Image (cartoon, rainbow, N blue to C red):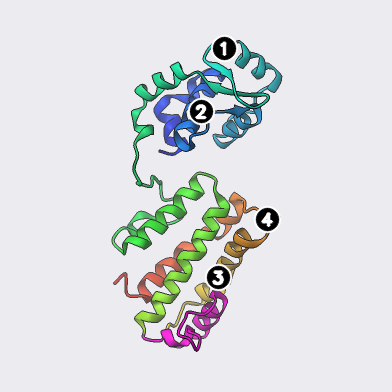
Amino acid sequence: MNIDKFALLSGLYEKTEIEKVELLAFFHNQLSGIEDFTIPDICAWLETLSLAKPNTSRLRKKLLAEKKFVKGRSQDSFRLHKKYQILLENKFPQTNQDNENIETIDSILPKPLYENTRGYIDSLSKQINSSYENCIYDGCAVLMRRLLEVLLILSHEANYIEDQIKDPQGDYQSLVSIINNSISSKTLKLSRNTRECLDSFRKIGNLSAHKIYYNAKKKDIRDIATDYRATIEELLYKSNILK
């Protein structure tokens, strides 16, 4: 369950400030096992939901006075009292279900595009959507690059030209070489828009994967999302996965 769905399920938006903190502390504990949290953590949680940043001094006083919270292990940290953690686990059992289902609202790739393809394409598409929806933009960019590479290789294989993108040892070349071959290939016959966009998807994925001081932003993904969806759809056809 992602944070947006939990917020709606729990009625979080209608709660008081301290009730919001209680619910968010519970959710993040269920999501990642985090017990201790700080005031900056709370501010980041609220910002993710586009909620106003609290007065930190006032919030700290409320946390110290509220019996639902106790001091954490590290300095200036707090944690939800175990009693209230258990009460919320009983109230929202769905947050503690141990499964690998990826929940997504298909913000980058629409479900009808990938749902009847192949298992690994379905999984990558859901991960792309989910990472974007949960503000994991570097992860989203890297996954977008990976799916692009997979479908370019499959497109070459489906058209029996995979040797054009292999090195003398029979291994696939780097993505930049695969893209250059795809652009010039008279067999693939990629559309003009796709040819022009391919390297931009590779670049943003590379920046997120390798550049130390770079962090992808929502706008970085949003700006290329429409062209990316169109490219993935074209490659699904070129690889004969979609007919």
The answer for how far apart the CA atoms under marks 3 and 1 are is 53 Å
Which three-letter amino acid code belongs to the residue tagged 1?
Glu
Report, in whole angstroms, how far the alpha carbon at label 3 lies from the one at label 2. 39 Å
Residue in the picture at 68% in, 25% down: 75
Residues 116 and 44: in front is 44
Give coordinates of residue 116: x percent, y percent.
28, 61
Instruction: Say which of marks 1 and 4 sits in front.
Output: 1
In the picture, measured across the screen, residue 18 lies left or right of residue 188, that is right
Could you tell me residue 109's position as x and y percent? 42, 57
The image quadrant of residue 65 is top right
Q: Which residue is mark 4?
A: 214
Q: CA distance from mark 1 to mark 4?
A: 39 Å
**Circle 1 — which element?**
loop
Q: Amino acid at mark 4?
A: Tyr
Q: Mark 2: which secondary structure? A: helix
- Residue at the spot of label 2: 24
Give the mark nearest the N terminus, 3 or 1. Answer: 1
Q: Which residues are the magenta region?
A: 160-187
Q: Residue drawn at (43%, 82%), measured in percent from left and top?
A: 188
Label 2 environment density (alpha carbons within 10 Å; few <14, some 14–19, many ≥20) = many
Which secondary structure, mark 3? helix
| Label 3 sits on residue | 197
Secondary structure under badge 4? loop
Task: Check contact, mark 2 vs mark 4: CB within 8 A.
Answer: no
